[in-house]
Image (tube, helix red, strand yellow):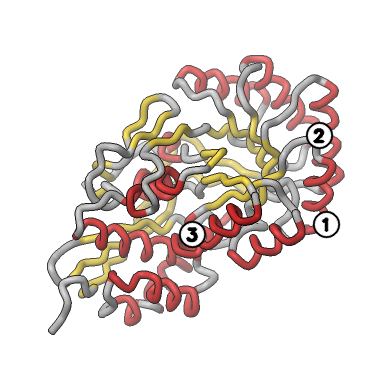
Amino acid sequence: MTAPTTIRALGVEPLDIPLFAPFGISGGAQAVARSLLVTIELADGTRGYGEAAPFPAFNGETQASARAALELVRSTVVGADVRAWRPLAAALRARIGAAGSARCALETATLDALTKRVQLPLYAFFGGAGSSLETDMTITTGSVEQARSAALAILARGITALKVKIGAGDLQLDLARLVAIHAVAPGSPLILDGNGGMSAAEALELMGALGARGIRPALLEQPVPGDDWDGLHRLARWGGAPVAADETASSATQVLRIAHERAAQVVNIKLMKAGVVEALDIAAICRTAGIGLMIGGMVESLLAMTMSAHFAAGQGGFSFVDLDTPMFMAENPFEGGFRQDGARLDLGHIVAGHGVRPR
């Protein structure tokens, strides 16, 4: 007899959402979020929803490659029982380990369906430490005037923590942008995110120039390429601000190395990098090693961002929150999700699952 918690169907469809303006990082820009909506249906009719949001400029993963990975594991997923969510995640890791966004979408949909059946919100499933967070907002790559205007617009939203994309190739431009931002937001914490676009020497030069002007960032996130361990070590020791690993921290194995070598003070956990279940392992390693926690994402819609909010709020202890990309999207094809008031993201009204559903 088939259990009511057995997955009987898997749906995959494009989720293309235009942005108000291209989202630029050091590796490139994206004008449309080309994601995938994943739906699983259980034998009792319960549906769970997940999002695969690959960002080619981050790690080369694309909508097409994510779809191919999902099709590769279709026979593994259909017929599985959502109550066995960890064995299912292990099977996905074994077969499509490099397809982080596909794993994230399937695991999100699985846990959404499971917790809907028992009327449990995912923030409670993840630990119940809290049901709200406060996010920063990103200033993407661009001109000095664009950076200044963006900072003022973010402050007008009631958001004070500013994340600034740097490392696009012009150190003096980065410095001028940061000085202009600090001038209009002198009390705002600044998170500098290089997305691997700088050398350690360039990052140290920038930090020195900022220090000479009395500007001390709250965090220096992944200034060097993901495989530049020597550069990361150098910055973690001499950078003048806590260093967060992002591209270098795409798996639990990498994070274990970071902890062992003390290569960073903070790890940016993104569910799209390794899936939800491996992200739980990453958070556990960080807590054990005394590494600070940050929650972030790719260019994700309300669905994936709400899932990440459940993950971080439910576990607690996340010092840095970067769940802002729905604010960059010109359309919202979903209902429900977190409620936002300025920087505050509230999940307390959600009674089951992640609380997001297609319109």
Residue matched to label 2? 206
Marks 1 and 2: in contact by CB < 8 Å? no
Residue matched to label 3? 280
Quarter of the view holding residue 258 = bottom right
Which label number is shown at residue 66?
none
Q: Amino acid at mark 3?
A: Leu
Element type where label 3 sits in the image: helix
Cα separation, mark 2 vs mark 1, equals 18 Å
Residue matched to label 1? 230
| Residue 204 located left or right of residue 308 | right
- Which mark sits nearer the N-terminus, 2 or 1? 2
Query: Which quadrant, please, contains the N terminus?
Result: bottom left
Quarter of the view holding residue 253 = bottom right
Q: Position of residue 81 (x, y in %)?
A: 27, 75
Q: Residues within 10 Å of mark 3 (few under 14, many from 20)?
A: some
Residue in view at x 15 percent, y 72 percent = 4
| Residue 194 located left or right of residue 200 | left
Element type where label 1 sits in the image: helix
Q: Amino acid at mark 2?
A: Leu
- Which mark sits nearer the N-terminus, 3 or 1? 1
